Image (tube, rainbow, N blue to C red):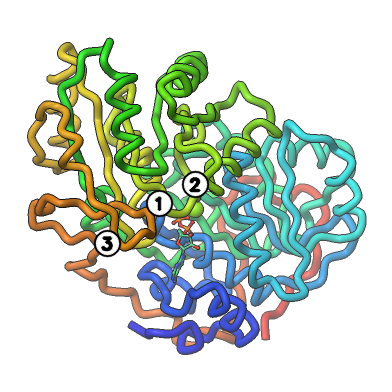
Amino acid sequence: MPSTFAQLGVPKFIGHALARRGITQPFEIQAAALVDAMAGRDVCGRAPTGSGKTLAFGIPLVANSGRADPHKPKALVLAPTRELSDQIATEIRSFSGRARVAVVYGGVGYGPQFSSLRRGVDILVACPGRLEDLIDQGAVDLSAVEQVVIDEADRMADMGFIPAVRRLLDQTSRDRQTMLFSATLDRDVSSLTRDYQQDPVRHSVTEATPDVVAADHMFWHVARTDRVAVSARTINAAGPTIVFCRTRRGCDRLARQLDRKGISAAAIHGGRNQNQRTRALRDFANGRVQALVATDVVARGIHVEDVSAIIHYDLPNDHKVYRHRSGRTARAGKGGIVVTLVPPDQIREIRYMKRRLGLHQPITDADLSAIRTFDGGTGRPEPRRANGGQSRRPSNPKRKHRKPRHPTSKNRPRHPRSNSKRPASRSRGKRTPARTRS
Ligand code: ADP
Ligand code: MG
């Protein structure tokens, strides 16, 4: 596997910008997908949270997107949540050079979004709802979009966005490149691939699922009435923690209860407005609050660096949710702790979920001494216990064999988009002439 971005053909200005952030070695999904993606091929990438998907699609967007006319972006990234959209835009801006990157989502005023679109946006990051709204108002026209990314496609499906995603894709250029990323490729997601991607190269980084293996998982018997106290002590011992609750009201209540126990906590969920959510995330990221109390809506795609612990205060609905929540810690090869509070009446459910996850840790009494010792003041946990023989870094023992990429890679013309499987509505709307990549 090439060990630098330059070896993958990443333009120098991007490589330099990444190096300034300490990013020098491509992660597996990046090494696997970048060459094809920069050559303009459709990519269908399956990879868990924290595996580095943003750069895998962000670099090709910056490398290839052209200069946009007003209201007519050249590249579009669709993401399910506001937080995720912000994070994608921020990450891409860190190496975007002269490309203009803007982000649009609901729950905030239209003014700034109108004016940046009027000035011209090369790479637009958007939540589907607001984007359709802006199109209806004549502020955006997708006909010049030549590169599309669908990020967290599985999450889009969970949130009911697939019809909107299809309507939006139908308005983009016929010759576009379509990159789709998802932690899972379930039915809805694979139908997107079938209908909107052309001979995609498929990359999968799933074995030994990093987000689950990299963390230290603990399952504790805790009576419902003791959950607040145990959570407070865990947060005290572990450091920055995200606590997951099932309901919005549960989040608000727990944040208050933790506060009363001397733990500063902020609630973040879909019932809070954008400013409140942004503030909560910022306060947590810069250490002003010790804990973020969240619903599953915000579970995916959020990056706060160095989250030491996850507490499943309410049980996740299933093993997939467990995986997504837990993926907030132990990101990018770092360690982390995941504590599940197991009430007596839910032991069977937990056992079943653990089997699905391949986790074999026993359910024990709460044991704070098992949590950690700090490693040299970075605030990251260092477990005292042996880790069940598991590597703490995302390992890839069975590294995927890459499909050979297209022989003529770079100058290969785009596929003719005459595939009969494409929805008829793709012929609607204005078309820009096919762009030749050279
Ligand atoms: P995903 O979208 O797959 O959940 P992200 O793209 O958000 O993952 O990346 C997770 C974290 O890893 C981010 O903080 C990102 O800046 C960092 N990261 C990504 N690629 C690299 C790399 N090659 N080297 C070091 N850090 C990286
Ligand atoms: Mg992501």
Q: Earlier in the sequence, mark 1 or mark 2?
A: 1
Q: Evaluate if marks 2 and 3 touch, with contact meaning CB atoms under 8 Å apart.
A: no
Q: Secondary structure at mark 2?
A: loop
Residue beneath disc 3: 394
Q: Is residue 61 above or below residue 155?
A: below
Amino acid found under the numbered disc labelled 1 = Thr
Instruction: Using a 10 Å C-alpha cutoff, classify the residue at mark 3 as few (fewer than 14 neighbours), some (14 to 19) or many (20 or more).
Output: many
**Rendering coords of residue 344 (x, y %):** 15, 14
Identify the residue at horizontal 37%, vertical 41% (top origin): 324
Q: Nearer the viewer, residue 19 or 358?
A: 19
Residue beneath disc 2: 301
Q: Nearer the viewer, residue 129 or 303?
A: 303
Q: Nearer the viewer, residue 12 or 238?
A: 238
**Rendering coords of residue 326 (x, y %):** 33, 41
Q: Secondary structure at mark 1?
A: loop
Horizontal side, residue 42 vs residue 31: left or right = right
Horizontal side, residue 199 vs residue 322: left or right = right
Residue 425 quadrant: top right
Residue beneath disc 1: 49
The response on whether ligand 1 sits within 8 Å of label 1 is yes
Identify the residue at horizontal 58%, vertical 56% (top origin): 149
Q: Is residue 335 above or below residue 11?
A: above
